[in-house]
Amino acid sequence: MYDENNIFAKIIRKEIPCETIYEDNKVLFFKDINPQAKIHVLGIPKEKVINLREFIDIDDKNTLVYFFKKVHEVIKTLGLEKQGYRLITNDGLNANQEVPHFHVHILGGQNLGGLK
Ligand code: AMP
């Protein structure tokens, strides 16, 4: 069940600040507080979904298209298209998912090494 008090829910409600890269009424992109690369941005839809499975099960599929189009727009805005980037989502125990609100990590700005 979705935890209304997870950190990203609080960030969406503006109870906790973040360094916003892009925001509208459906999505929010902000800098990761503990960056793992020169550029490390998190992207979240504002729907109350925990992981990719819940997100793709959402009734209004336009929401999915909208979110991933915005992911790509932000990637372009960050100037990552030419040199490349990595897009990650962590789900569950084996992935050590810390925050139970679906999110993608956009990493770039340097060579990211081999770990997939
Ligand atoms: P994950 O392991 O995929 O759940 O990643 C959660 C990410 O959220 C980690 O990379 C954290 O550094 C990041 N994070 C946690 N709290 C905050 C915060 N208040 N602002 C920005 N990023 C955060």
Image: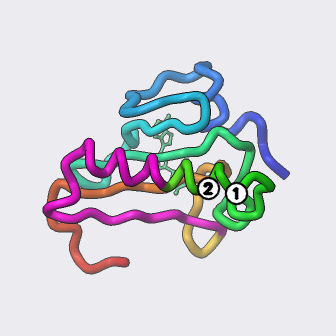
CB atoms of marks 1 and 2 within 8 Å: yes
Magenta stretch encompasses residue 75: yes
| Image location of residue 12, percent across then percent down | 61, 29
Query: Horizontally, is 68 left or right of 6 in the view?
Result: left
Disc 1 to disc 2, how far (Cα)? 5 Å
Vertical comparison of 11 with 76: above or below: above
Colour style of the rendered protein structure: rainbow
| Image location of residue 93, percent across then percent down | 65, 70
**Amino acid marked by disc 1:** Lys
**Amino acid marked by disc 2:** Leu
State the residue position of label 1: 61
Q: Quadrant of the C terminus?
A: bottom left
State the residue position of label 2: 64
- Please state the extent of the stretch shown in magenta in the rendering: 69-92
Name the outermost residue toward the front: 62
Vertical comparison of 28 with 1: above or below: above
Callout 1: helix, strand or loop?
A: loop
